Image (cartoon, rainbow, N blue to C red):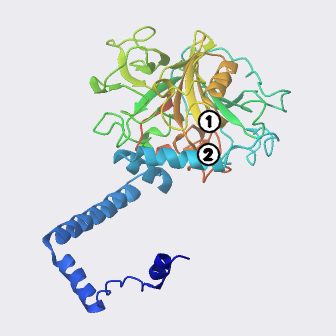
Amino acid sequence: MTAQQQLVAARPPAARPPAAPPRRRRHRIRRVMRSRVFRVIAAVLLVLLIWTSWSIGQALTAPGTDSAASRLAEWARDHRLGWVVTDLEKIQYWLNPPMTGGTPAGGIPSMNDPAARPGGGTAPTTPPAAVHVPAHLPAPAVVRVIAGAPLANEGRWQTVGEVAGLPAVRVAYVRPDNVHTSYLVGVMWLDPKLLIARLHPGTTDPGGTWPEPSLIPPQWRATAMAGINSGFRLGDASRGGYYAHGRLVSPLRDHAASVVVYKNGTATVGAWGRDVTLGPQVVAVRQNLDLLIDGGGLNPTCATDSASEWGATLGSKAYVARSGLGITKTGALIYVGGPAMSVCTLGQVMLAAGVTRGMELDINPGWIRGAYYAHDGATVTPHRLIDFSDVEPPPPPDRLFNISTRDFFAFYARQ
């Protein structure tokens, strides 16, 4: 070691500035807290906290049967936090992907076995009376099974609602594909010659005052035969239009997949501007995304994850609860709802049920509301088409008998 290095090593360490006495630090903190800027910031934060708590409380206690999770998700989307909801849904999906393999617990539900029917209850055999019996559609072909060798009763139609002794509502159950074979998808066949379709508005989507209430009211339940959910929220990536009773709530987009309800109570599905257009006989139009089934074929873009075509939630490739509505070549309406489906497999199930033009509706268990209603004299018993109890607490079967925040379709016996 050189002499210079020895001098450096022997030099005492630099003295550190003395720490501020505790009393001085407390004085500085009090001075900051007393400043005008601090008081303004604290007041703003307090107001935001109070307002947020009040706003969330209003959402959680609003009328209806939506789950707390659904209400919080809707609140977040209404306040520009939809990206948070989407990210949380993706995390949940990654942590809990749908099961593969296996067979459905209990097999295919039978309408003759109350214990096997989703929701249980009495057998839906006694229909409402009808004064006039219009023409009716022929019986549909068995739903083609796409998950391999059929299970007992898989794809077989079972009548769950009649009008004047004629089958007006039928249901069948199939597995969604040959991978997710422990899940069942419900398929519901509706005869528009025996049923009248109505688009019921939701209290928030679209909101406002309409001739139809935001629920199936008690005085209408004697003829209620089925109810299904509508599409995604208006104004989001679905680019969906909404028209009813001469009022345009959201612009009708050319080429959009559209459910159209006419004054005579019939309904159809088609591409706006090509298959269906606005006219004096149109009562309501509800659009959602693009056609998934067109000309009896599957849209080849179903697996592209295109937000403009299939929405901006989990993406079209995620196997989640989905629903859809289509029309067959005979004019029957086909509703499909169930778990563990991608956009493409939803389309495959719709094709297997005979759909020639069809569209995706809403997704996620909380928003899939397919139900049929059994009549035994003056008693009306609602039944879920699909029980999502293995995914989350299932919505009550009488959900559409209560105030709905989202719009929905209901089908009533022609009188």
| Residue 213 visible in the current orientation | yes
Q: Is residue 169 left or right of residue 158?
A: left
Q: How many marks?
A: 2
Please name whichever residue, 138 or 365, is drawn nearer the observer in this view of the structure: 365
What residue do we see at 63% from left, 12% from top?
297
Quarter of the image where one finds residue 28 = bottom left
The N terminus is located in which quarter?
A: bottom right
Name of the residue lying farthest toward the left: 36
Badge 1 vs badge 2, beta-carbon distance below 8 Å: yes
Q: Which mark is residue 318?
A: 1
The percent position of residue 199, horizontal first and vertical second, equals 41, 30
Q: Which mark is residue 93?
A: 2
Q: What's under tag 2, amino acid-wise?
A: Tyr
Name of the residue lying farthest toward the front: 3
The percent position of residue 161, horizontal first and vertical second, equals 62, 32
| Residue 404 visible in the current orientation | no
Bin the neighbour count of mark 1 within 10 Å (Cα to Cα): few under 14, some 14-19, many 20 and up. Answer: many
Q: Is residue 232 left or right of residue 151?
A: left
Q: Is residue 188 left or right of residue 253?
A: right
Q: Which mark is residue 173?
A: none
Give the answer, above or below, for where 139 lies relative to 187.
above
